[in-house]
Image (cartoon, rainbow, N blue to C red):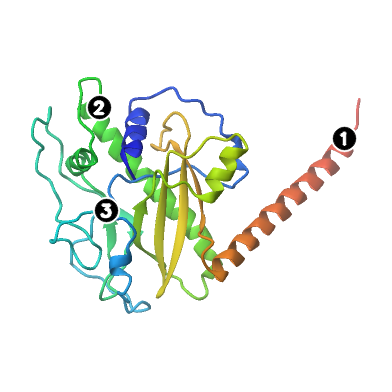
């Protein structure tokens, strides 16, 4: 994800009056949520890691942080992550907290132990934006805005995982504990679906992520398009999320077909039920 994501989060945190009219998104079955300013490119570097999946046990090892794309040589070979940068940036106008929140999203570990992705602190988020070329100005974010941005970021990622789990429920018998292996931002690389919708007159997403989910040893790629959802709600959600398995395998194509059929089926049943209800009304 590039600067567009950070800007979108800033505008949301500052209460931008953005239209809420996104009915066209509802046709896709999309629900509100996420974006992350810190991510690796594609997760290929850890593609060979095969955790001993079914056996999961607790560990005292520190959880991993949100993946960040780096060219440094000190990154972890497991998740391609650099050491956390909690140092204040040069000319930073105000101090920022360094505390971090642990997510509910399980991560792939080398030994199969139970660990969860950890969200960046406000200071880490600030440093990440600077690495992307952003520079602070007086009219930009305030100290309070950074707190809201982090809450938006975390809430959106939590909702993103919930959307992934809805698809993974189709495979609950073969894998009851899917985990997020890696995720990368592709803000300027629009998905074919997003481009097609734009040709029909709908807006383009402001961001895109590709998530790699480990389905008990099998890598499954998900494409997530983020659309502007307007004003931030009480749960710090402002994005509309269109999430689906990528059309890069027979299983994913079959899942997409199954869900499309179920959506059509229940929509048709609702229409039939509604027409029967209307016809049964008696005028007085």
In the displayed image of the protein, which residue is found farthest to the top? Answer: 139
Residue 141 tag number? 2
Residue nearest the observer in this picture, 23 or 253? 253
Q: Quadrant of residue 198?
A: top right
The C terminus, quarter of image: top right
Query: Which mark lies nearer to you, 2 or 1?
Result: 2
Say which residue appears at 44% left-offset and 22% top-offset.
Answer: 17
**Mark found first going from the N terminus, 3 or 1:** 3
Say which residue appears at 59% left-offset and 64% top-offset.
Answer: 253
Query: Which mark lies nearer to you, 3 or 1?
Result: 3
Q: CA distance from mark 3 to mark 1?
A: 56 Å
For disc 3, the neighbor class at 10 Å (few under 14, some 14 to 19, many from 20) is many
Q: Provide the residue designation for mark 3.
A: 66
**Mark found first going from the N terminus, 3 or 2:** 3
Q: CA distance from mark 3 to mark 2?
A: 22 Å
- Residue 108's spot in the image, x, y percent? 31, 68
Q: CA distance from mark 2 to mark 1?
A: 55 Å
Instruction: Classify residue 71 as left or right of residue 212.
Output: left
Q: Quadrant of residue 122?
A: top left
Q: Provide the residue designation for mark 1.
A: 281
For disc 1, the neighbor class at 10 Å (few under 14, some 14 to 19, many from 20) is few
SS at circle 2:
loop
Instruction: Classify residue 124 as left or right of residue 40.
Output: left
């Amino acid at each position: 994800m590039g600067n567009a994501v950070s800007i979108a989060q800033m505008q949301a945190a500052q209460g931008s009056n953005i239209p809420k009219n996104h009915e066209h998104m509802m046709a896709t079955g999309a629900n509100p949520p996420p974006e992350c300013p810190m991510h690796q490119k594609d997760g290929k570097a850890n593609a060979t890691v095969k955790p001993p999946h079914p056996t999961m046990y607790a560990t005292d090892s520190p959880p991993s942080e949100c993946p960040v794309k780096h060219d440094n040589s000190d990154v972890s070979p497991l998740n391609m992550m650099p050491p956390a940068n909690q140092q204040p940036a040069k000319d930073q106008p105000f101090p920022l907290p360094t505390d971090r929140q642990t997510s509910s999203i399980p991560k792939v570990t080398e030994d199969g132990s139970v660990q969860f992705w950890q969200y960046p602190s406000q200071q880490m988020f600030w440093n990440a934006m600077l690495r992307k070329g952003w520079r602070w100005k007086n009219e930009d974010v305030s100290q309070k805005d950074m707190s809201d941005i982090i809450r938006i970021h975390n809430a959106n990622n939590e909702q993103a995982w919930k959307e992934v789990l809805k698809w993974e429920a189709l495979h609950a018998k073969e894998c009851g504990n899917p985990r997020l292996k890696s995720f990368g931002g592709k803000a300027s690389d629009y998905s074919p679906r997003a481009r097609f919708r734009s040709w029909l007159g709908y807006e383009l997403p402001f961001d895109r992520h590709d998530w790699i989910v480990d389905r008990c040893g099998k890598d499954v790629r998900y494409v997530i398009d983020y659309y502007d959802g307007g004003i931030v709600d009480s749960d710090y959600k402002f994005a509309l999320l269109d999430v689906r398995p990528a059309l890069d395998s027979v299983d994913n194509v079959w899942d997409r077909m199954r869900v499309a059929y179920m959506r059509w089926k229940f929509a048709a049943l609702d229409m039939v039920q509604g027409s029967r209800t209307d016809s049964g009304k008696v005028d007085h």
